[in-house]
Amino acid sequence: MRRTGEPMTLSLPPFTKAVTWLLGINTGIYLLMELFSRAAPDVVRFTYRHFELIPSAVVQHGALWQLGTYSFLHMGFWHWFGNMLGLWMFGSQIEGAWGTRRFTELYSIGVIGAAVTTVGVAYTKLLGGPDTATVGASGGVFAILIAFGMLFGENEIMMIPFPFLIKAKYFVGILIVITLAFAMAGGGDVAYVAHLGGLFFGWLYVRRGPKPALVNVGFAERYYGARNSYYRWKRRRAAKKFEVYMSKHDRQVHFDEHGNYIPPDDEPPKGNGGGKSGWVN
């Protein structure tokens, strides 16, 4: 990837915090499933039956955890590899620009949004059905892709293995058209509807999501305003108590409405021996 106008270079993105964790969790689960498929296939069947996304299980049996757990399961090497490659190549750029918290929100909303879309479409019976299972992290990855196209639209992407560059916004646009075409055609064994759900909810988050800087500033202003009001109230309360205490000892002291001490009128000013003029040089 490169910005338009920069010299041609080939560089790999960094492994940012959340991306590294997601890569590690997905890869670990994929390797365990591959191992158990040979040593204990019943474990694999149990895992998929309870943690893949089955719309009827979510709606009729309340298996709400499947709205998230399905994204950690993959069917085969290329399914896992393609999702992890997209997560790393594009996700690291988003996390570097937004920070770990907002990136994690984007990814999670893409995953859950894709699941909700899949469940809703399954009950229309236009594509698939309530008992059709879905697995894979594509919903989160497609949310990342749409965010990348919106935030870094002018960046150019090398279309490996093809030797040419394309701007990110055009790449994402072509991807959306292809995904929509396959979804309308039925999609075979690929959950293109989930891809579209991830795209839509990713777009919605970027357009309507919180602006962290403004949110943090507003929260800080409210917090410090409330804290300062509390301290002023304590100071006024302490001043009133001190006035009462001193009056009991036949001494009169006075404080203003902010709790600041008011010195008596006959107290001589400090610093010039009581004179009315200051130092002269």
Image (cartoon, rainbow, N blue to C red):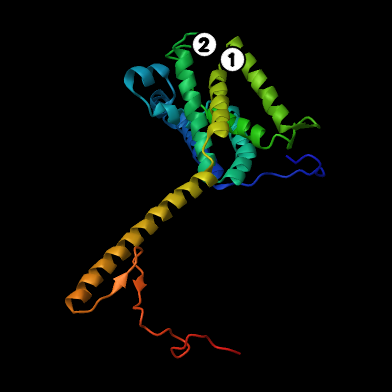
Q: Residue at (70%, 23%) from the top-left corner?
A: 174
Which label belongs to residue 60? Answer: none
Give the vertical position of 175 relative to 101 (above or below). Answer: above
Left or right, 98 with respect to 124, comes to: right
Dot 2, crowdedness within 10 Å: few (<14), some or many (≥20)?
many
| Image coordinates for residue 263, horizontal then vertical, percent | 35, 77
Left or right, 55 with respect to 126, comes to: left
Which label belongs to residue 183? Answer: 1
Q: CA distance from mark 1 to mark 2?
A: 8 Å
Q: Give residue 145's quadrant in the image.
A: top right
In the image shown, does 136 or 97 lie closer to the viewer?
97
Q: Quadrant of the C terminus?
A: bottom right
Say whether marks 1 and 2 touch (CB < 8 Å). Answer: yes
Identify the amino acid type marked 2. Answer: Leu
Q: Residue at (35%, 82%) from the top-left corner?
A: 266
| Image coordinates for residue 182, horizontal then vertical, percent | 62, 15
| Image coordinates for residue 185, horizontal then vertical, percent | 61, 10
Q: Give residue 47's quadrant in the image.
A: top left
Mark nearer the N terminus (1 vs 2) = 2
Which label belongs to residue 127? Answer: 2
Left or right, 145 with respect to 119, comes to: right
* Residue 138 visible to an observer of this rendering: no
In the image shown, does 239 or 153 lie closer to the viewer?
239
Secondary structure of the residue carrying numbered label 2 = loop
| Image coordinates for residue 206, horizontal then vertical, percent | 57, 34
Give the vertical position of 116 relative to 262 (above or below). Answer: above
Q: Residue at (62%, 30%) from the top-left corner?
A: 146
Identify the amino acid type marked 1. Answer: Ala
Secondary structure of the residue carrying numbered label 1 = helix
